[in-house]
Amino acid sequence: MTVQDQTPEREDELDPSEIHNVLRNDRRRRAIQHLRESDGPIDVDTLAEHIASVETGESPPPRDVRKSVYVSLHQTHLPKLDDLEIVDYDQRDQQLELRDRAEEVEVYMEVVSEDDISWSTYYFGVGLLGLLTLLAVRLNLLFVSSFGVEFWSWYFLVLFTLSATYHAYSEQKQQVLGL
């Protein structure tokens, strides 16, 4: 990849290094994700409480954690996202909302979300499960041997085919939507 390939196509697009810088911080990613899931503007207190809950796994989160998250959002993360025009952050009213430019960053967040697995991991898992199942049939283990090799071979062939079809469909849908 050349330097020319890394420059944005339009002048108003974010530079890849800026996108990487935004996404490498968990709190910025969580802020963008929560704003995307919200209906309209939210206040910084609500966002801080949400992020603190996610980080601690407690609801409500401890006050000191909530305060720490609030301070880091207010002093560092939200001004940065505002400067890059990803969010509209009104420091006086403590309100924030996603801007259109957030889509440039969200594309990279949707590749594999935090709670998801990649397609390659999925296919590897299905393949490994298929091999172990066929091995169990050959060795007459568990209940799987009662169905026979032919049944399990067809089962995993159909599973792979349906998975690949869905994978291709979802990839095509993302391309059509410009994601």
Image: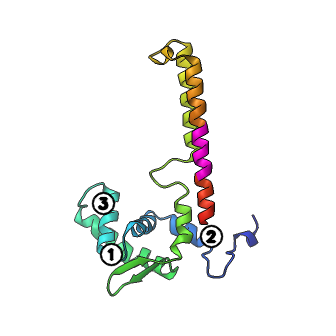
Hey, which quadrant is residue 91 in on the image?
bottom left
Mark 3 residue element: helix
Q: Nearer the viewer, residue 131 or 158?
A: 158
Query: Which amino acid type corresponds to the residue marked 1 in the rendered image?
Result: Val
Q: Is the C terminus in the top left, top right, bottom left or bottom right quadrant?
A: bottom right
For residue 81, side relative to residue 68 (left or right): right
Task: Please say whether residue 168 is one of the residues in the magenta stretch.
Answer: yes
**Magenta-colored segment: predominant secondary structure:** helix
Going by the picture, which residue comes out furthest to the top? 140
| Residue 53 image label | 3
Residue at screen point 37% across, 72% down: 72
Tell me which residue sits at (51%, 80%) in the image.
Answer: 85
N-terminal-most mark, 3 or 1: 1
Report how many numbered discs are placed on residues in the image.
Answer: 3
Residue 179 in view, yes or no: no
- CA distance separating discs 3 and 2: 30 Å
- Give SS at disc 1: helix
Q: Quarter of the image holding residue 155? A: top right
Q: Mark 2 vs mark 1: which is more N-terminal? A: 2
Q: Which residue is mark 2?
A: 16
Q: Is 67 placed above or below 54 here?
A: below
Which residues, given as a range, are shown in magenta? 161-169
Cα–Cα gap, marks 2 and 1: 27 Å
Please say whether residue 109 is one of the residues in the magenta stretch.
no
Within 10 Å of disc 1 (Cα), the crowding (few <14, some 14-19, many 20+) is many
Residue 48 occupies quadrant:
bottom left
> Which dot marks residue 44?
1
Marks 3 and 1 sit apart, C-alpha to C-alpha, by 14 Å
Q: 67 left or right of 110?
A: left
